[in-house]
Image (cartoon, rainbow, N blue to C red):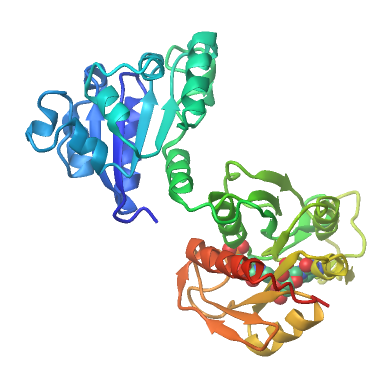
Amino acid sequence: MLKGKKIVLGVTGGIAAYKAAELVRELVRRGANVRVIMTDNACRFVTPLTFEILSGNPVATDLFRATGNFEIGHIALAEFAEMVVIAPATANLIGRMAAGLADDLLTTVLLATEAPVLLCPAMNDKMYANSAVQENLSRLVSRGHAVLEPGYGELACRAEGQGRLAEPLEIVEEIESILTVKNLRDERILVTAGPTQEPFDPVRFISNHSSGKMGYALAVMARRRGAAVTLISGPTALPMPRGVTFVPVGTAVEMRDAVLERLDGVTVVIKAAAVADYRPAVCEAMKIKKKGASMTVLLERNPDIISEIALQKGDRILVGFSMESDHLLEYARTKLMGKGMDFIVANDVTEPGAGFRGDTNIVRILDREGGVEALPRMDKMDVAGVILDRVRKIRENGRIPDGR
Ligand code: PMT
């Protein structure tokens, strides 16, 4: 998504300036063309050489000799930018922007650019809470600029509080989100992700290999496109995505209850979770001690969540997944028709690069009219994009097939 995107990064003078180096590295890794502007104070914390090497571009520090090339002045940088990011943004820079000042290269570019601007404040917690800073930020937001709030934690001044620069990956996610066309703004999308864990005593459970990556990719991409997203997730090692309503669950029954409780007002349901079909009939209160050479755990059926959603389908678009190790299309079609989905995304866990854990998937998308779209091996984020395109197409055509 960021491939070829022209991003101007303004670095101002705070201790968090060193984190901007990591941000540049990540943006460049994703293919962005990054130009860095440093204020005089930023140069006291990190040298321009650091950013020059990481971005592969000259670093601009001086209004009158921007990047040492007369062609690339402040207007040229303002026009070059498809997006301007300020990280870290100090209270001083925020104040000067709010006042409309243009007394150095960065503030001049900020006044001259028509690109979206993202501010990532970082400062002492009391400074951040100060009404002058908050009023300045509100003013900048009312002018259409985006603000990525600082995180809580230990600050450079050893205080604890809100003021830490957002993590580089969070900043990158916000940049991706701002640059994404908001074509799902009217949708409220509920995504399920990850495995369920079905315990049979306090230390053991039955589960599967789902990492949650497929479902989280759907939640992140849907949020980038402007949807209001609820992510109901079984236990995973993934960080909670920003900007979505996150509901952690353990068992299939908990997932079913969480989904049905939140179904009101939801316009799209995407069930990427790998739900255990069976659970132990009994969960012992105490750890089961080993006795004989073998042990039997009696299993009973879990509720079929997607079938229960289909009973209340209404105008909702219902998307299911099918995970198979054989007869992929045949089994997927049976689930599509039997479980009342609008379309189903089938993946074969035996195919290298598909299914559990990895960053890629290989899917076939089956619709109720008999169509099958076979996609090559793709990053799970891109697979999510294709699924959301389908959702949009169904909505645009005004065609909500009778899911039953
Ligand atoms: O999480 P990752 O590591 O990224 O892996 C991704 C994935 C392989 C888990 C994902 O791509 C996937 O295929 N998810 C669905 C797995 C699955 O449970 O498939 P199924 O064929 O058993 O179920 C069919 C559909 O019914 C699914 O949408 C499932 O969420 C739903 N279901 C299943 C059982 C049940 N009791 N309730 C359900 O709602």
Kindly identify the residue that appears in the image at 37 percent across and 29 percent down: 87
Q: Nearer the viewer, residue 237 or 187?
A: 187
Q: Residue at x 48, y 73 (%)?
A: 353
**Residue 120 can be seen in this image:** yes
Residue 184 percent location from the top left of the image: 60, 55
Give the total number of marks visible in the rendering.
0
Q: Position of residue 97 (x, y in %)?
A: 37, 20
Point 35% across, 15% down: residue: 96
Residue 180's x, y, as percent?
47, 52
One can see residue 276 in this view: no
Residue at screen point 81% across, 50% down? 262
Residue 332 is drawn in which quadrant? Answer: bottom right
Image quarter in which the C terminus is found:
bottom right
Residue 48 drawn above or below residue 232: above
From this view, report whether residue 36 is shown above or below residue 255.
above
Q: In the image, is residue 253 above or below residue 174?
A: below
246 and 186: which is toward the camera: 186
Could you tell me residue 279's position as x and y percent?
A: 84, 65
Q: Quadrant of residue 320?
A: bottom right
| Apparent side of residue 209 relative to residue 282 in the rendered image (left or right) | left
- Identify whether 250 is placed above or below 363: above
Q: Quadrant of residue 307?
A: bottom right
**Quarter of the image where the N terminus is located:** bottom left
Q: Nearer the viewer, residue 93 or 16?
A: 93
User: Which quarter holds ligand 1?
Assistant: bottom right
- Direction from residue 269 to residue 61 in the image, left or right: left
